[in-house]
Amino acid sequence: MSRISKDEVKHVANLARLAITDEEAATFTKQLDDIITYAEQLNELDTTGVEPTTHVLDLKNVMRKDEPKKWITQDDALKNAPDKQDGQFKVPSILE
């Protein structure tokens, strides 16, 4: 027994603005039914005592510490600028 119908597949394709043929709808119906069947097998597992996770690895914070450090000077930053004015990059105006 199929858990998803061909009409449901066509409806979802329509919502996604996808044009699919009847042959494609039949193929997708079979594939989606296989996916649903596999997901239902996962529901049979006993997960009592298993804490929900958002990530497989126990990651806390993967970013570096926010510490001040020596950076390039303003003159170094502007040295290769094609145009500069008053210590800033000068770019063409885009507003009229």
Image (cartoon, helix red, strand yellow):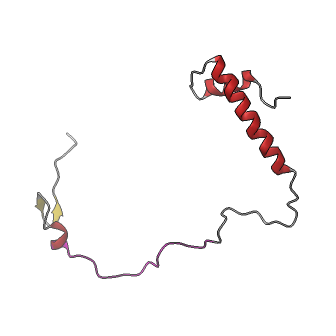
The foreground one among 3 and 38 is 38
In this rendering, the answer to whether 30 lies above or below 19 is below
Q: Position of residue 91 (x, y in %)?
A: 17, 52
Q: What residue lies at 22% left-to-right and 42% top-to-bottom?
A: 95
Q: Quadrant of residue 24?
A: top right
Q: What residue lies at 16% left-to-right and 48% top-to-bottom?
A: 92
The foreground one among 55 and 40 is 40
In magenta segment, residue 60:
yes
In magenta segment, residue 27:
no
Q: With 3 as the anchor, is 88 left or right in this view?
A: left
Q: With 61 as the anchor, is 55 left or right in this view?
A: right
Q: With 71 as the anchor, is 91 left or right in this view?
A: left
Which quadrant of the rendered structure holds the C terminus? top left
The magenta-colored residue range is: 59-75
Furthest residue in direction top, as rendered: 22
Q: Position of residue 37 (x, y in %)?
A: 80, 40
